[in-house]
Image (cartoon, rainbow, N blue to C red):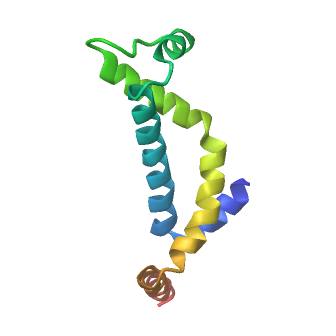
Amino acid sequence: MKTRFTTLFNEYGLVAIVVHFTIFGLSILGFAVALRMGLDTQALSQKLGVQLEGASGTAGTLFAAWLLSKAIQVPRIFATLVLTPLVGRIPFVARRIQRNREETKG
């Protein structure tokens, strides 16, 4: 899997990085919203050992969202592997990738 990920970054460059970090950011955001909207914060607080309510609640929520996002790292990597070639087919993105390849060769 590491070689596929490296090949993807070599082929798509910045597009792969943007896709990867977009998925990462959206997963943190999604978990943070889920935690704020009523996910069982009491049980999660006890399991993670962080306070998800009160004065340090926002920091605790973001930390818990980050931990949950790290827990799904393998599916996020697979999503990056699948979505990057699809994003690379968008016409203006494909032209940018081609231009970067030509500049690298020339």
From the viewer's perspective, is residue 84 above or below residue 90? Answer: above
Q: Residue at x 48, y 80 (%)?
A: 90
Q: Is residue 65 above or below residue 19?
A: above
**In the image, residue 10 above or below residue 67:** below
The residue most toward the left is 55
Query: Could you tell me which residue is drawn at 42 percent across and 46 percent down?
Result: 25
Residue 73 at what x, y percent from top left?
61, 42
Residue 78 quadrant: bottom right
Q: Vertical placement of 99 versus 43: above or below? A: below
Give coordinates of residue 20: x percent, y percent: 51, 55
Q: Nearer the viewer, residue 39 or 91?
A: 39
Please report the residue visible at 65 percent of the width from the left and 47 percent of the height from the top: 75
Callout count: 0
Residue with the most extreme front position: 38
Q: Quadrant of the N terminus?
A: bottom right
Q: Is residue 90 left or right of residue 75?
A: left
Is residue 18 found left or right of 73 in the rendered image? left
Write the residue at 61% across / 56% down: 79
User: Horizontal placement of 47 versus 102: left or right?
Assistant: right
For the residue pair 76 and 5, the one nearer the viewer reads as: 76
Residue 34 occupies quadrant: top left
